[in-house]
Image: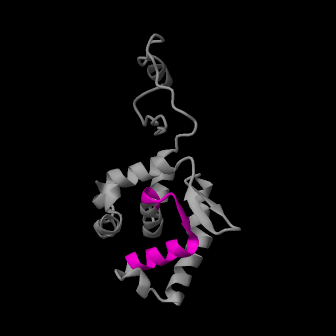
Amino acid sequence: MIEYDKPKIMGGRNNSEEESSPQPDDDCERPQISPAVLRVDYVFEALAHPRRRYLLYTLAVETEWSLRELATKIVAWEQNIPEETVRPDERDKVYLSLYHTHIPKLEKCQIISFNARTETIETASSAEQVIAALEGAGTSIDSEQESHAHRDNHEWFT
């Protein structure tokens, strides 16, 4: 799941000291990590923007959304207003932001899949990992977002 680079040793140590450091026993069982597991930096990148987090909160409850429904829901959350009061111009701005920026980023990491013909978004192979990270981070990322998602999607949090 998490990839670590070997730290570079600065000053004081030479290569012979580094080579003589203890190595794990060959008898030790090493965990097998599936290549399908997302690197942690992709998870953080997916969660870095509030609109992507809102998108993921919605996918945690319902695994398929039309882009129009999703844009409307995100505007309502961002402005803390009922969905039925979202103006078309506000929805269109978020729609474009999702379409051109956030959906391609999440699709590239295989977190969502987007059908351009039907304009629907659904979870993809890595969605579960990112949604679990979002659920685990919760209010430490953004308490207002968490409260919106909790209010609208209470079954996810029970």
Hey, which residue is sitting farthest top in the picture? Answer: 27
- Give yes or no for residue 4 being in the magenta stretch: no
Indicate the quadrant where residue 49 lies: bottom left
- Give yes or no for residue 63 being in the magenta stretch: yes
Q: Position of residue 114 (x, y in %)?
A: 63, 62
Q: Position of residue 103 (x, y in %)?
A: 58, 65
Q: What residue is rendered at 62% in x and 56% in y? A: 108
Q: Is residue 79 above or below residue 127?
A: below
Indicate the quadrant where residue 86 lies: bottom left
Range of residues picked out in magenta:
59-77
**Front residue (pair 85, 133):** 85
Q: Quadrant of the C terminus?
A: bottom left
Hey, which residue is sitting farthest right in the picture? Answer: 117
**Front residue (pair 121, 137):** 121
Identify the main secondary structure in magenta: helix
Q: Position of residue 156 (x, y in %)?
A: 35, 56
Q: Is residue 22 above or below residue 71?
A: above
Q: What residue is rendered at 44% in x and 79% in y? A: 75
Colouring style: one colour
Q: Is residue 71 above or below residue 23?
A: below
Give the total of numbered labels: 0
**Front residue (pair 13, 86):** 86
125 sits to left or right of 154: right
Q: Is residue 158 above or below residue 91?
A: above
Q: What residue is rendered at 43% in x and 53% in y? A: 131
Q: What residue is rendered at 64% in x and 69% in y? A: 119
120 sits to left or right of 4: right
